[in-house]
């Protein structure tokens, strides 16, 4: 099943600002409000998918206490402001590009969720038209972390990366973007709050996040979507394979 979506956005000015930032700085910081999402989207996303029934821990993952699930959607731009989204048949990750952790994980069926596809369309529309692929795949990783978030500055070797915070307890987990040739050169430092995201050009930055810090009366936890706007070789797509 394919769904054609016109991204909502709060205003055309917000979309143009996103394009300006992506063209010049290589990244954009936004929020649910910026994308014009329905109230309560983040809470419903958290309630429906960040659950014991969806998330699993894998022995070979890093960090070891991380829980995860994954989905992959296909996209095709039918015009500058309309994108077609459908379910991709495979979600497995290869072992190339220095990737660590499991290559096969549990699937979270997101493509049938109209609110998730609306969010996906909004995120994809952050990419300026001249930088878009006509069609491709969008990887969605659901991550729950409690201590270490990532092992250090790295690249995923895809076209664009998205980090969206769904829920968080505790402090820390500062997201940072570093120049590729000098990890000590930090271009962006920001603590994303629930409902906020950053999208950036993966070729221009390494990205990282600092460890979580427990609150005085409990344990830290951070639930996020980490998404990839993939290069064609990650999941090759033939035009005839798109579900219609």
Image: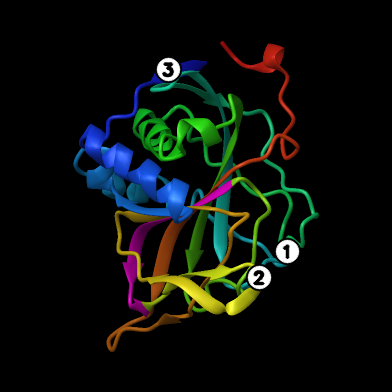
| Disc sitting over residue 4 in the figure | 3
The structure residue drawn at horizontal position 68% and vertical position 53%, both measured from the top left corner, is: 157
Q: Nearer the viewer, mark 3 or mark 1?
A: 3
Q: Position of residue 219 (x, y in %)?
A: 37, 80
In which quadrant is the C terminus drawn?
A: top right
* Image point (30%, 59%), residue name: 194
Can you see residue 51? no
* First to last magenta residue range: 160-171
Determine whether the residue tagged by mark 2 lies in a helix, strand or loop. loop
Residue tagged 1: 100
Q: Are marks 1 and 2 in contact (CB under 8 Å)?
A: yes
Q: Which mark is residue 24?
A: none
Q: How many marks?
A: 3
Residue 95 part of the magenta-drawn span? no
Label 3 vs label 1: CA separation? 34 Å
Instruction: Tell whether 189 sits left or right of 169.
Output: right
Q: Earlier in the sequence, mark 2 or mark 3?
A: 3
Query: Label 3 near label 2: C-beta < 8 Å?
Result: no
Foreground of the two, 189 or 47: 189
Q: Image quarter for residue 80?
A: top left
Which residue matches tag 2?
62
What is the distance, in whole Å, between disc 2 and disc 3 at their CAs?
36 Å
Question: Which residue is farthest front?
Answer: 24
**Left or right of 143, for residue 9:** left
């Amino acid at each position: 099943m394919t769904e054609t979506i016109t991204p909502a956005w709060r205003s055309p000015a917000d979309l143009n600002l996103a394009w300006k930032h992506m063209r010049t700085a290589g990244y954009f910081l936004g929020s649910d409000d910026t994308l014009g999402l329905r109230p309560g989207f983040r809470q419903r996303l958290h309630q429906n998918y960040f659950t014991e029934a969806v998330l699993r821990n894998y022995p070979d993952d890093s960090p070891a206490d991380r829980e995860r699930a994954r989905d992959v959607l296909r996209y095709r731009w039918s015009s500058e402001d309309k994108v077609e989204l459908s379910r991709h048949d495979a979600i497995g990750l290869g072992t190339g590009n220095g990737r660590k952790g499991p290559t096969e994980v549990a699937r979270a069926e997101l493509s049938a969720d109209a609110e998730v596809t609306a969010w996906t369309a909004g995120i994809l529309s952050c990419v300026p038209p001249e930088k878009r692929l006509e069609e491709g795949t969008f990887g969605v990783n659901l991550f729950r972390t409690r201590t270490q978030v990532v092992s250090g500055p790295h690249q995923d070797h895809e076209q664009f990366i998205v980090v969206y915070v769904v829920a968080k307890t505790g402090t820390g987990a500062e997201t940072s973007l570093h120049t590729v040739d000098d990890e000590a050169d930090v271009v962006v430092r920001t603590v994303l709050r629930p409902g906020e995201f950053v999208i950036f050009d993966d070729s221009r930055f390494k990205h990282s996040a600092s460890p979580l810090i427990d609150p005085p009366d409990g344990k830290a936890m951070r639930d996020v979507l980490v998404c990839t706007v993939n290069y064609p070789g990650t999941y090759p797509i033939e035009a005839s394979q798109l579900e219609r």
